[in-house]
Image (cartoon, rainbow, N blue to C red):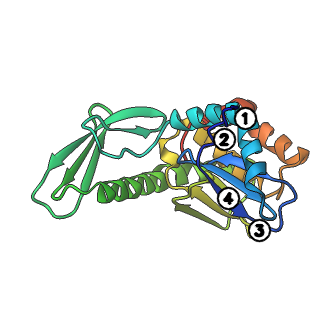
Amino acid sequence: MIEQPIIPEYKHIINPKLKYIHIKIDEKGEIIIKSSARVSKQEITEILYNKREWIETSKLKQKLKKGKIPTFETNENTLYYLGNIYPIKLTKSNKQNIQIKFSKDSGFELFYNIFDTKLFQNSIDSFYKIASKKLITNIIDKQAKIMSVEPTAINFRRTKRQWGSCSSKNRLSFNSHIIKLPIDVIQYIIIHELSHIRHKHHQKSFWQEVEKYCQDYKRLEIKLKEYET
């Protein structure tokens, strides 16, 4: 009797605009299959079997990504800040609101009244957003002057799939967790989005613009992929 291969769990999404069947591993390590129409279970089984090595490698890469927000399931929790990793200490407090303090010498300290991991994570999101606005807006302003471009607005918000974007009206938007990245990677992201003010695509002229102000952007692209968005 031939043993059937064990097929991992997956999520199937139908999108009529797609021409081919696509497979990806999301930020949670789950398998996502996208196709233009319903695909038979047998066909999906064959796809997953043929891609089994790629799936395992991709899952491992996702698991090892830096900058994940802690779940606080153990006493050893850490946060990234400007590419460096710091411990985060939990301290019981009488105050109702959660407070986060940071020092380059001792790391993070989170003061709380009620132990609630969701509230802890929301507080970290808020800390990152405030810190990103404070530090990175100044870098954007300086780099925009160097490149002789002018964004119409600069926003910071939590996104799961991208670090930055530039709208058709030159509004720049950055992932509020950008502050956890190394400063050279942050600089690259800023140059990348400012270059979109002149070039609304990723064709050769766009990358030439990026390279003009960031010669090692290819290395930084690889470095960026080490981090969780």
Is residue 214 visible in this depiction of the protein? no
- The residues bearing labels 4 and 2 have C-alpha atoms spaced at a distance of 35 Å
**Residues at marks 1 and 4 touching, judged by CB atoms closer than 8 Å:** no
- The residues bearing labels 1 and 2 have C-alpha atoms spaced at a distance of 7 Å
Query: Looking at the rendered structure, which numbered label has been put on residue 12?
Result: 4
Toward the front, the furthest residue is: 1
**Residues at marks 3 and 4 touching, judged by CB atoms closer than 8 Å:** no
Q: Which residue is mark 2?
A: 188
- The residues bearing labels 1 and 4 have C-alpha atoms spaced at a distance of 35 Å
* Image quadrant assignment for residue 103: top left
Residue 1 location in percent, x, y?
68, 31
Q: Which residue is mark 1?
A: 217
Q: Which residue is mark 3?
A: 168
**Residues at marks 1 and 2 touching, judged by CB atoms closer than 8 Å:** yes
- The residues bearing labels 1 and 3 have C-alpha atoms spaced at a distance of 23 Å
- The residues bearing labels 3 and 2 have C-alpha atoms spaced at a distance of 20 Å
First in sequence: mark 1 or mark 3? Answer: 3
Q: Nearer the viewer, residue 166 or 198?
A: 166
Q: Mark 3 belongs to which amino acid?
A: Ser
Residue 177 location in percent, x, y?
49, 50
- The residues bearing labels 3 and 4 have C-alpha atoms spaced at a distance of 32 Å
Residue 55 location in percent, x, y?
66, 37
How crowded pointer 1 is (Cα within 10 Å; few <14, some 14-19, many 20+) is rated as many
Is residue 216 visible in this depiction of the protein? yes
How crowded pointer 4 is (Cα within 10 Å; few <14, some 14-19, many 20+) is rated as some
Q: Mark 2 belongs to which amino acid?
A: Tyr
Q: Mark 4 belongs to which amino acid?
A: His
Question: How many numbered markers are drawn?
Answer: 4
| Image side of residue 134 versus residue 54, left or right | left
Q: Nearer the viewer, residue 119 or 60?
A: 60
